[in-house]
Image (cartoon, rainbow, N blue to C red):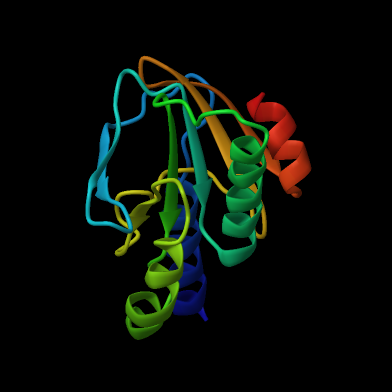
Amino acid sequence: MRAIIFISCMFLANFAQASFYEAGDQVTPIQLEDQFEQKVEVNANTLAILFSRDMDGGDIIKEALTLQIADGEKIPATQVYIADISGMPSLIAKFVAIPKMKDLPFPIGLDREGEVTKLLPSDEDMATLILLNNLKVIDVHNFGSSAELAKALR
């Protein structure tokens, strides 16, 4: 019985240590490759990270960016879209998902292992918008619809 309690306490202690960036935190610069194997960076000039960890969140971001482009707006260089695709089976990513992403008119930084983006906050089935100033997190917002996200990006 004591062993179970000890193991439970160790698990909870490790879980409590795992946290995500929040307002006031300094983000580590990020470098990933996009769907075209081009470099995508989050650096001191980045003002916004659009982030998804699952397909629903990704769909919200893709629709919002597509709306932005359809309205004649350009996606600013200070706005970076990053997706954690580590949960996707590698064959599906390689032969289905990434080829579909190549049809999109904007780059998506792809974290294939999940390590680079492990501290980026996200809610399940939501798109995350992380506002930055010189790599310092100013605010974090989650969106459940592309219309809400598109409005926030304006």
Where is residue 120 drawn, in percent x and y? 45, 43
- Residue nearest the observer in this picture, 34 or 54: 34
Q: Please report the residue visible at 50 percent of the width from the left and 46 percent of the height from the top.
A: 51
Where is residue 81 drawn, in percent x and y? 45, 43
Q: Please report the residue visible at 22 percent of the width from the left and 49 percent of the height from the top.
A: 38
Q: Is residue 88 visible?
A: yes
**Image vertical order of residue 49 relative to residue 82, above or below:** above
**Image vertical order of residue 148 relative to residue 11, above or below:** above
**Image vertical order of residue 19 relative to residue 137, above or below:** below
Where is residue 75 drawn, in percent x and y? 50, 31
Q: Is residue 87 visible?
A: no
In the picture, the quarter occupied by the C terminus is: top right
Q: Please report the residue visible at 36 percent of the width from the left and 29 percent of the height from the top.
A: 27
**Image vertical order of residue 58 relative to residue 78, above or below:** below
> Taking 74 as reference, is 141 left or right?
right
Where is residue 128 drawn, in percent x and y? 59, 42
